[in-house]
Amino acid sequence: MPVPDAPATGVPSDPNGPVTPEPARPSRLDPAIAARLRRSADGLVAAVVRAHDSGEVLMVAWMDDEALHRTLTTGRATYWSRSRREYWVKGATSGHHQYVRSVALDCDGDALLVSVDQVGAACHTGHRTCFFTELPVTTQAQP
């Protein structure tokens, strides 16, 4: 059975509190990078994670400014858990590490593309990718 990743550090969980980070949380992110981010109302940016070698999409997670700072400066993928309200380093407890090779910001500043060397499964279910459930497409578009 897969072992979920535990948070590395962060705000203690409060089951009765909000499930989003406070947008004003201090961060050590370079102000020039922070200025380019277009965050959601809860201060987050979507992080699409792909395998560096194959380009396969592995998962989608969320980062706030500090999670992005930690990712850029440690080389380890660090995310914000919306449910636990904590930072977590992918693989900290499961051993399914993500070693960051590159991070790109999209043209609108509202999404990140994180290329990683994935060790083990990316999905908490034990699958290599979180995108293992195909949905039926009933019509094929023509070019």
Image (cartoon, grey):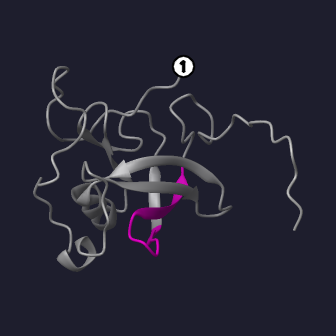
Front residue of 22/89: it is 22
Q: Does 27 sit left or right of 90 as displayed?
A: left
Q: Is residue 84 shown left or right of residue 132?
A: left
Say which element carries label 1.
Answer: loop
Q: Position of residue 34 (x, y in %)?
A: 24, 71
Q: Quadrant of residue 108?
A: bottom left
Residue 110 versus residue 136 in the image, above or below: below
Percent of width and height locating residue 13? 18, 28
**Which segment did they paint magenta?**
102-118
Asked if residue 81 lies in the magenta stretch, the reply is no
Picture quadrant of residue 29: bottom left
Task: Please tell me whether residue 105 belongs to the stretch shown in magenta.
Answer: yes
Asked which quadrant contains residue 135, the reply is: top right
Query: Left or right of 136: which side holds 121?
Result: left
Residue at the (68%, 61%) spot, across then down: 54
Examine the residues drawn in magenta and state their main secondary structure: strand
Provide the residue designation for mark 1.
1
Which residue does the image show at 53% across and 46% down from the upper left?
59
**For this rendering, which residue is in front, 27 or 18?**
18
User: Measuring 10% from the left and 57% from the top, which residue is drawn there?
Assistant: 26
